[in-house]
Amino acid sequence: MSTITSSTGKAESVTVRRTEWSDAEEINHLISPASVAVFGRLNVINLLEKANLAVTLSSSKNEVLAHASFSDHPIEELVDQACWQNRLQNYASAEKLTPMNTLFLRLFVAQPGFSIGGAKEIFRTVFSAVVELEHICLLTPYGGALEAALQKIFEPMTSVTDEAQYSAYVCHRHDHCPRLHIRKARVEDHDDLMHIFGEQITPLVETYGPFVLSELIETQEQEHHTAVCESDGAVVGFISVSAHVDLKLLNKCFELGAFEGLTKTDPSQQEEPHQLEEENPADDAQQSDETNEPVEGEQTAEEETAGGDQYTDISQTEYTEPCIKETVDCCEDSEPDGPSNAFCIQLFTMEKKFEMRSADFLPYLFKLFPERDFCVISVPKQAADFPLLQSFIRVAPRDTSTFPQELYLCHRWGLTRRLEVRVAVSSDIPAVQSLTESLSQRDSIIEDLDLFLQARKNSDGTALQAFVAHVDGRVVGLIITRDEEDIEFIRANFDIERFMYFSHNQREEHGRLCHFLLSPVFQHYTKYIFREVLRLAHKSCLYYLLPPPHDCYKNVSAHSLTAVLNFMVPVSPRRQIIYPLEELGINAPSQHITKLQAPFALYHTNRKLAMEPKVTINARIVVVGASDTALAFLEALTFCPHLRFNNLSLISTHALPDHSSDDCSTFLATSHCYNDRDQCQISLCSWISVVTGKIKAINRADKHVELMDDSRVKFDYLILCTGLQYQMPNLSNADVITQTSNSLKPKETRPRVPSNLFLLNDHQDCSVAHHWLTHNFTQLTGDAVVYGNTIDVFTCIETLIGLGVSGRRIHVVHPPEDQPFSCFPDASVELAVKQALEKEEVHVHHNCLLLQINDGQHTEPVTSASFSTDGAILQLECAVFFSFSRKSVDCDAFRAINDACLVFDGRLVVDSGFHTNDPSIYAAGPMTKYSRRYHAEEWSHCCFQSKEVGQSLASVLLAQCDPTLERPVDPPPDQLHLIPLYSQAKTQGGRLPGGYNYLHVAKPVARKTPSAHKGRDLVTGCAETGNYFHIRHSQFDVVEKITCLSKTPLPVSNLQSLYGKHQRLLNNICSRYDEGLIQDMYSYFKENWCLALYHDRFADFEQEVCQIMDSAKLQDESGSVSLEEALQQIADDKAESDQLVSLSQTFQKSQAYSALRNSVLDYLKYNRYHLSMYARPGLL
């Protein structure tokens, strides 16, 4: 926030921010004839879509006072965007203008009173934010005179020929935001520096005394230096650097092989760019970074006050805030393998106003150590991101590292301003072969490069483009792209329109990234290289398709694109309509949309995103358990486009769910939160470090989790989402009295599980059971005992029958329940399943409590089981035993929670914000319960959809971690003891005996709450015939429950979309049902009219309609009234139907009716690629 003064003398507090789409209308109103005379007639939306940088000056009331749009090339009417440098050679000093240091002004508008002040503030901010920017040019062919504000900023460029047919102007950094002056620190600077440090210096003062800063300055010598930066003679920043770096410890804790271990291996090659390393997306994205000793390295370099064009140094960055970095003295007994090639930053601070210019230190620092090529800095993991790090590269920690800080480094070549991107030529082949020498995808890369050089096309005829990044003629990177031919499929299946206006990008402007290779020391320039590739290739958008780990694409160099993922944004998959293609016929959407492709994750960048830094969050967030709640939490974090989480870890018994094979998944019922395709499309393995294991202990004081193998995982935030698991049933008579199927108390010790007794809790357990059954049971003799009362009992039976096991060999044993209970809320479904079991001759036993296995003798393997019944003891011989009798918190997790003194009351106790009694430990999902102070024993997270709970947990943690969000305010006192309620439906499904496909969608309900249904039920079909469909409406005619039982596959996502819809939206389903017009709801919901309801953007459309109706005004005799007031008046007067008709006619004459009609047509038009079966005006 800063203050500018208008031409009338009015002072206004203003903010310079990135332009949003909602600003377009105000910007359009600011365009004057004088602006058109300079910039031409512009489509503002199209300009904002194609501009690399668009900034807006807004008032404290968010009113647009001024706006400027910048691009990396002049307007297309003047010159081809890929060749603008040649065109500017007609002007003096044009050789200083390069793609890296130059932007072009495409539009500037302002309110008349704020034109001059607004222009100065915008240009100062742009120069400050874009570190490498030195010049801003304005080229116009229209001949109009610049307005006064621009005349004060730009100076004409002198033409050296008479051929120029356009006007050219330029402004320079040194006129608006000059480089800071860097000099050696002096003791006299002490007082100024103490003011800048503020409270940040307190820990150092308490440790080393009040004069620690002056002593640090006084002790400067050849291997230790301090420096300050000045602006207008005032000190605004400080840095301290040292040549002492503990290379032994750093190499032990970090992957420094690509940087030669920070040692000099060949002094003659010390300034040569390093060779490429092969990278792995899963390894680079997130790894657990911990350290046993804090070792500090911070870097800074500085440039003296010369003009920007003389600099040969530049830095790349990620966003951060200034903070103090302390270094610990290096271990003197560490002996590196070679001479040290690095120096470190020990202490650094910057005034907040100048923090974006902190990279000005870097060139100066490298001059202090001319024989060293690397500057390193270590940063506390919970320290806020700060702009200096934009010029550094994060070094991945080793898997075994416990280093408590993040390590960043900068190579002196990483400051060069001479990095250029150009089209690849045949003479680049030797250099590319050298770069790819160690890569497994080398052959694929060379093959695609040869195809480009020979034919400009790949083998299927798709246009290829290849570019090289080079410094002074030395190739340091290779980028190969192709035209994106499947853009319709990508648009339909991924939410790319979150980042763009699709209609303002031509089909040929979409490209796919095939290969990206870049020397590690230049990786912080990735976004600049993207920007140049888009310009040279005449593209506006770039995509990268990441296949799942179990697939292998021949022409995709996944391992070489790890760094790319950090500089692109992940794109969320969209929920798809399941089309009845046969019924639609020619009205079906294009095959480009409906075709089935192998799943992939999508990453994206465009011209705007190429100049948007991400906020780096290094806090160690450790999630325990791969439940639906945990996956939803991780998905919400990783799909924040403006954030980069470097330390997300998942501890799971069987790692992430692997759905590469569906043969085993039918053992268990499903919540339909995530399926195999969803897992591939969100690709969590690219962003998180997965630790396979189980927790043994939680050390709250030291903030680490100990695993069963005695390894440790450090955390700053611990998220417990283990869920509930089936446990080993009690096996002794002594336990008969206490054993119940719904017991909440975990066992204190884990009994040994026999090899043929299966507790199925996840996909891996099912896979093991499937393999064992195939080799040890299905083709042999012996019976199977399935024990329990849950729906998993029946899905397991159907899987056994599907494996060829005769029903006569299966015994279903139901334990007694405290209260009458059925896992099927619908009696018709329960009856159909019962009849299916009878048909298959499955033996069913009720009210049987497990007493013993193998008569109390040895338990390996299980050969018999004894059950107590209402009569005699039931003795069953068995070759395999499945237990689904009791779910509770895993006993190892319980022991770790209990030993850590976290409050456990049958479940782990949390408050309404997911907090346990430890502020660093959160918990969510079925393993939790609300504290008793809420007096809500009947409600817990298990009552709600796990995915929605996980997303809510992510929003709570983001409020703590994301510096771009305001800190949440405490709720009012009257809301402190209220629990949050969630609205999304809980879904349960699976394949049941008899070949039935089962789906149950219902609103969240409290446990042990008697049903008090006041709505109505609509039922078609019969459960026994496999076409049963049951919809329950609430008393407000809103769908609150759906139950389906069918012999054919169910369109699950379509049916889930019906939940929460009013019966009027379902084409007046109640009245049609009463009239006997609906005989089969499966067919009814396949009709064309309802497909729009299944669209993933229908909820947004509903919200827009509600806003229109809420703001609707009707004219009557008494004046203007709202629609709600008019309806209330009719209700109070108990009006007749003719008054309702009159109201309807009045509404049709209002502006709201026209807006409503346009909204419907816009919804169908905008989504016509999905909703091609709807007629639109002009179509017929």
Image (cartoon, grey):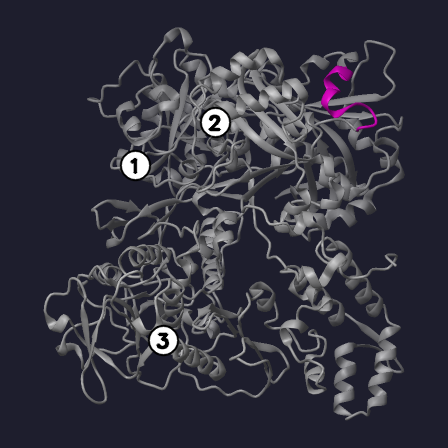
Q: Position of residue 422 (x, y in %)?
A: 64, 19
Helix, strand or loop for disc 1: loop
Closer to viewer: mark 2 or mark 3: 2
Q: CA distance from mark 1 to mark 3?
A: 40 Å
At a point 54% along the width and 31% down the height, the residue shown is: 555
Residue found at the very far left of the displayed protein? 857
Describe residue 247's horizontal placement relative to residue 36 as left or right: left
Whether residue 998 can be seen here: yes
First in sequence: mark 1 or mark 2? 1
Q: Position of residue 1170 (x, y in %)?
A: 70, 55
* CB within 8 Å, label 2 to label 3: no
Mark number displayed over residue 441? 2
Residue designated by label 1: 403
Residue 85 lies in magenta, yes or no? yes
Q: Position of residue 586 (x, y in %)?
A: 76, 57
Quadrant of the snapshot with the N terminus: top right
Helix, strand or loop for disc 3: helix
Q: CA distance from mark 2 to mark 3?
A: 59 Å
Q: Nearer the viewer, residue 224 or 157?
A: 157
Closer to viewer: mark 1 or mark 3: 1
What span is colored magenta in the figure? 76-88
Mark number displayed over residue 937? none
Quadrant of the snapshot with the C terminus: bottom right
Residue designated by label 3: 933
Q: Nearer the viewer, residue 68 or 1108?
A: 1108
